[in-house]
Image (cartoon, grey):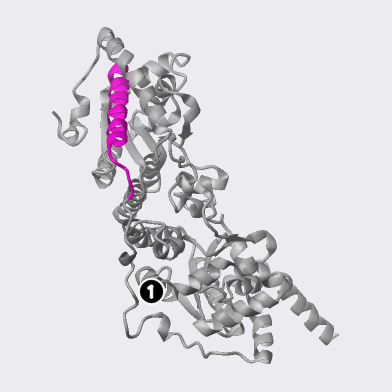
Amino acid sequence: MSEEHSGIFAAAELGNTVDKATYNEALEVLRVELLNLQFDLKDKDFSMVVLLAGDDRPGAIAAARTLHEWIDTRHIETNIMFEGGSPEEERRPVLWRYWSKLPPDGKISLFLGGWPTLLVRTAMERDWSQQQTDTTIEHMARFERELTRDGTLLLKFWFHLPKDKHQKRLADAEKNPERYWQFEDRDWEILKNFEPGLKLVEHMLRGTNTPDAPWFIIESSDVQFRNLSLGQQLAAALKARIDASTEPVVDPVSSVAQLPTGVNLLSQIDLSATVAGEDYSEGLLELQNRLNELSRAASLAEIASVLVFEGVDAAGKGGTIRRITTAIPIQNVRVIPIAAPSEEERLRHYLWRFWRHVPGAGDVTIFDRSWYGRVLVERVEQISSADAWGRAYEEINDFESMLDQSGVPVIKFWLQIDKEEQLRRFEARAKTPYKKYKLTDEDYRNREKWDLYQQAAHDMIAKTNTSFAPWHLLAANDKKHARLEALQTVCDRLESQLVSKLGVDWRAEIPRGPVHKAKKAKKARKKG
């Protein structure tokens, strides 16, 4: 065997075949088994994602068609993702297109090509460095780990065709194009770059081959062997998962310890900070004008931003958000209020509903509460197991890192007030007709668990305060102070992004907005 074929593809170049009689006999049993397993899956609390990729692109497509013949197509969705994304997908981080297509519990999704194919194609076309390739492989592995940890059954198949078989098929395709209509220019490109491509693929497969999401490399030369291997692996994995116990572990109340005595991150916030009324009015106008200019420039430079607001109940998140949105062009900003997940959201990974709202290039998405509910309310109220919320810190850091590396800064705020100020605001809300809707019985129940929520917030900040997405802790006993601090932080971060992308003279690269034009017109009038 040649040196280049002595790696992980060796077993997929043995020339395995299945005769027709054996195939038909095995298929009769397999199809019944797959249909029964699919029916059983409908009532389970997990989904199945099947990734079909490989250097044999037409073989992967043909395998997907075969699965559609064997199982009930009403409960399976196929996503063809060999090439680049749609215009909508290209405006967002790469993983957005995959997160947005994940199936709910009880369903199956097929991904043709998917993230491995995109990685290999992009790395070769753009001549990525080893570091760029390894970083992307690491992100892929983390994405897969988050899916499997949350319960998704992820099955990954790589269909391999030896180089001489590729050459023969493409030669036949050139002679009989009407018979090989499914072949595209991409298949000739694969053959042209076969050896370096295979080396890169092997590196990718090794970097993403894990116990919970292993790769199945299938020899694709013989159609019947390929189809039977795929179907049998699917059936075996799905049966094993359905037969396994999936009962969640319920953690005792004691799993959330009491706050330790001494100093913690929240106790270090100086809640006495205030701003005088006149200073607030001037500062607010100045910062909103600055934010208007920066947000318009960021939109034209196609810089997206994500703002996250968390904090104690009644700390003033809504009022702070309104002072920010007022300054941003309405077509470029969305506020996403986060409450308890809907039925559709509960059937998927908890990050799914947040990935759906990741902004496109040039836009701003503001989350009024966020994915941090996993390590706050779900922890304190014991909605999630200790294992689930415990691993969420790492998952959240990965999520925010992927956004940041895609050019989407994550700006996070925690608004802190003391217990006495919270009670005063509750009582004021109860007396104000247009604010009564903000006050619920749940607010008082949460207040009784003040110490538990404070500890959860301390742990959250300590474990997710990263260089790429640091926490900004705002003293909010004085709402005016918190609002100005938040505006200042957003402005500084947006300007930093503009300088990073366009240079220190970024204003020269951006058409001037209405604020600048108004100032210019005012100066002209004075001169006149």
Q: Can residue 242 be seen in this view?
A: yes
Q: Position of residue 187 (x, y in %)?
A: 39, 29
Q: Quadrant of the C terminus?
A: bottom right
Q: Mark 1 points at which residue?
A: 455
Query: What is the span of residues highlighted in magenta in the rendered image?
Result: 220-248
Task: Say which residue appears at 36% left-offset and 48% top-offset.
Answer: 150
Q: Where is residue 165 in the image (x, y as percent from the top left)?
A: 28, 22
Q: Can residue 326 be seen in this view?
A: no
| Relative horizontal placement of residue 146, taking residue 480 as reference (left or right) | left
Task: Say which residue appears at 40% left-offset and 48% top-offset.
Answer: 126
Q: Position of residue 393 (x, y in %)?
A: 36, 63
Label count reads 1
> Above or below — where is 171 with respect to 401?
above
Q: Quadrant of the N terminus?
A: top left
Task: Say which residue appears at 38% left-offset and 62% top-offset.
Answer: 397
Q: Nearer the viewer, residue 472 or 444?
A: 444
> Above or below — where is 204 with respect to 523?
above
Q: Look at the numbered disc 1 and give the secondary structure of its residue.
A: helix
